[in-house]
Image (spheres, rainbow, N blue to C red):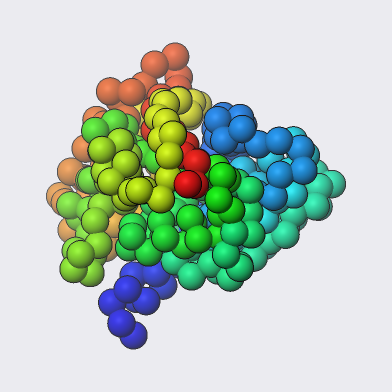
């Protein structure tokens, strides 16, 4: 298997248990939907949709939504979520770097903490812009490297094998200068904003345990360090220390970057 395919296989396995996070990421979804200016009847694609929190929110606002994700367990949960909510969404299992849609198929293409995990920014950007119609809106939420979740991912990277050559950290998508460069000349009206996701937890220690149990990249590090007690203890301590910086009123504050642009 080539290194990029192996990387994606690792992602697919790692995210399989993410469903428990939907009640947290679901609270951020309405902000992205409004930031993207989704209107009733708009044809919308949610890339890296996970359990469907953004696509469902958009569908409830009247969009004709499609959600695509690499991880079959999450797409299955997205289907259940749509059935429970009684909304119609077209769910697809697929790769953000090879979107199974014609050129200019959508009015709006969004991604909430999703496309940032595709390994090749230039490929995923090209794909998301390809399926967007001229004049359509691309909008996404990403984690800045210097804030809570970005620092947590840097900690994971420090304890993980290096990614394939040329694959940048996912949190490079949280830097407006990098995002502007990646979007390039094919878009206009690039706009940034910031928003906050509130993660209710009783303590930084509770937060660390919840993350270890439910967010694949962190679970994977804990598994790898199982035989190395002092390294594992230091990983856990550092994770709790990061969470403590952003912990207030029994909430871990997670600020993120919002980007919006119009396809030229
Ligand atoms: C942090 S989760 C976010 C899920 C969802 N958007 C949310 O806000 O709850 C990251 C998602 O990206 C998906 N993902 C990672 N790499 C992908 C790729 N190459 N193509 C499609 N989805 C991908 C994962 O399967 C996972 O569902």
* Between 102 and 156, the one nearer to me in the picture: 102
Kindly give the residue lying farthest to the top in the view shown: 249
Picture quadrant of residue 160: bottom left
Q: Identify the residue at horizontal 77%, vertical 43% (top origin).
A: 41
Above or below residue 66? Residue 7 is below
Picture quadrant of residue 80: bottom right
Picture quadrant of residue 28: top right
Kindly give the residue lying farthest to the right in the view shown: 86
Kindly give the residue lying farthest to the bottom in the view shown: 1
Above or below residue 67? Residue 145 is above
Left or right, 232 with reference to 86: left
Does any portion of residue 147 appear in the rendered image? yes
In the picture, which quadrant includes the N terminus? bottom left
Q: Identify the residue at horizontal 49%, vertical 57% (top origin).
A: 128
The number of callouts visible is 0
Left or right, 92 with reference to 3: right
Q: Position of residue 27 (x, y in %)?
A: 58, 31
Left or right, 84 with reference to 95: right
Does any portion of residue 93 appear in the rendered image? no
Q: Position of residue 20 (x, y in %)?
A: 57, 46
Q: Position of residue 131 (x, y in %)?
A: 56, 60
Q: Identify the residue at horizontal 50%, vertical 61% (top origin).
A: 130
* Between 7 and 47, the one nearer to me in the picture: 47
Q: Position of residue 96 (x, y in %)?
A: 48, 63
Q: Identify the residue at horizontal 81%, vertical 47% (top origin).
A: 87
Above or below residue 184? Residue 160 is below
């Amino acid at each position: 298997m080539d290194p990029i395919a192996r990387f994606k296989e690792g992602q697919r396995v790692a995210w399989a248990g993410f469903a428990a996070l939907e009640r947290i990421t679901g609270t951020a979804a309405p902000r992205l939907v409004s930031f993207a200016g989704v209107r009733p009847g708009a044809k919308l694609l949610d890339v890296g949709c996970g359990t469907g929190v953004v696509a469902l929110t958009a569908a409830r606002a009247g969009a004709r939504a499609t959600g695509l994700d690499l991880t079959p367990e999450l797409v299955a949960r997205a289907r259940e979520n749509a059935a429970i909510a009684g909304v119609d969404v077209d769910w697809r299992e697929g790769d953000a770097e090879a979107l199974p849609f014609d050129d200019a198929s959508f009015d709006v293409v969004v991604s909430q903490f999703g496309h940032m995990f595709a390994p090749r920014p230039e490929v995923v950007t090209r794909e998301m812009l390809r399926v967007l119609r001229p004049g359509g809106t691309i909008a996404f939420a990403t984690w800045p490297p210097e804030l809570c979740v970005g620092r947590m991912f840097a900690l994971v990277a420090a304890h993980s094998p290096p990614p394939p050559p040329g694959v940048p950290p996912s949190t490079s998508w949280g830097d407006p200068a990098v995002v502007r460069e990646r979007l390039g000349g094919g878009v206009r009206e690039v706009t940034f904003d910031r928003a906050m996701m509130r993660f209710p937890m009783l303590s930084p220690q509770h937060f660390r345990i919840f993350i270890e149990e439910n967010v694949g990249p962190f679970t994977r590090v804990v598994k790898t360090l199982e035989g190395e007690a002092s390294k594992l203890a230091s990983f856990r301590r550092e994770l709790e220390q990061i969470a403590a910086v952003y912990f207030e009123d029994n909430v871990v504050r997670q600020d993120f970057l919002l980007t919006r642009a119009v396809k030229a």
